[in-house]
Amino acid sequence: MNLGELEKLVLNYFWQTAVADAKQVYAHFEQTRGGTLNTIQSTLDRLYKKDLLTREKIGHAFQYRAAKQRKDFIAGLIKDTTNEFTKPNEDTIMAAFVSLSSELNEEQLDQLEQLIKNHRLTTPLVEET
Amino acid sequence: MNLGELEKLVLNYFWQTAVADAKQVYAHFEQTRGGTLNTIQSTLDRLYKKDLLTREKIGHAFQYRAAKQRKDFIAGLIKDTTNEFTKPNEDTIMAAFVSLSSELNEEQLDQLEQLIKNHRLTTPLVEET
DNA sequence: TACAAATACCGATTGATGATCGGTTTTTAA
DNA sequence: TTAAAAACCGATCATCAATCGGTATTTGTA
């Protein structure tokens, strides 16, 4: 999935704001970077067509929201990215972890261990796909 | 960093093959996907200018190699990707780990713990930046 | 119900960037 | 010195995001 600059800004906006229609999004970006309402509208439409935003008509305007949690979206991006450089049969997620782990310091290793513990507690015995 | 389709193929090729000149790369892709030697040459050049390949003139041809290990390259990609959707002050690497971790199963959690252990053994007391 | 305002939708244009390849210049080995 | 090999240059095409004017719809309300 390849995203343009404005598309990224808008996505981040929705993870901060939850719900908004085109006019509200425009109001937010008008000051920061100019442009017209139409530009925002077509960007929202593009994100909607990419399944990154959902929308629901309320009154006469669509109310948009992020289709996925930020966390899940990033996880998906990382998996896709990693996939493109992963050998066949290589476990993509583990490859990503291996790649990242080389940059961790002590504190981060501690956090990671904690993360694993929590994960084991909250999702016991999940089936594999 | 945005890479085209052929650029990705070529990068992957170099992680498999280590060293090659344009002619050799062309020989490899000629069968699979056609195109001309020139196309390969300009792709190599683009990757070189992006610092993804190094080159050294030997005889009359440049010998190209991957500038980074696959692992480090992927780690960089993930960090860049994640950065674009990370709140200010949020730890990017940890954010990536958190994103990914939600998809791990038991076996992968085990592997990850092992990874941490090894990492602690091989890189004791690394300074932070 | 008709109408005005708000919004969505359509389509054209521009700008980046990757893919492709022909043609020319440069380099090098003999 | 020169012919062949390779590098380099530049043009064209395709795709996609950004932008925005203009038109068609929709809807709340008078």
Image (spheres, coloured by chain):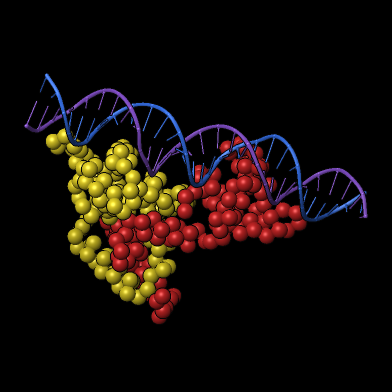
Chain colours: A red, B yellow, C purple, D blue
Q: Quadrant of residue A55?
A: bottom right
User: What residue appears at the point 50 percent right and 43 percent down from the top-left corner?
Assistant: A5
* Most foreground residue, B7 or B2: B7
Q: Tell me if B38 is positioned left or right of B98 in this view.
A: left
User: What residue appears at the point 40 percent right and 63 percent down from the top-left corner?
Assistant: B100
In the image, is residue B56 above or below residue B15? above
**Residue B33 point in image, percent of width and height:** 34, 51
* Most foreground residue, B30 or A81: B30
Q: In which quarter of the image is residue B121?
A: bottom left
* Most foreground residue, B17 or B69: B17
Q: Tell me if B100 is positioned left or right of B55 in this view.
A: right
In the image, is residue D25 above or below residue A29? below
Q: Can residue B58 be seen in this view?
A: yes
Q: Quadrant of residue A32?
A: top right
**Residue B73 point in image, percent of width and height:** 30, 50
Image quarter hosting the N terminus of chain B:
top left
**Residue A31 point in image, percent of width and height:** 62, 38
* Most foreground residue, A111 or A32: A32
In the image, is residue B91 above or below residue A124? above
Q: Tell me if D15 is positioned left or right of B8 in this view.
A: right
The residue furthest bottom is A125
User: What residue appears at the point 36 percent right and 56 percent down from the top-left corner?
Assistant: A84
User: What residue appears at the point 76 percent right and 56 percent down from the top-left corner?
Assistant: A59
Q: Can residue A103 be seen in this view?
A: no
Question: How many numbered discs, if any?
Answer: 0
**Residue B122 point in image, percent of width and height:** 19, 60
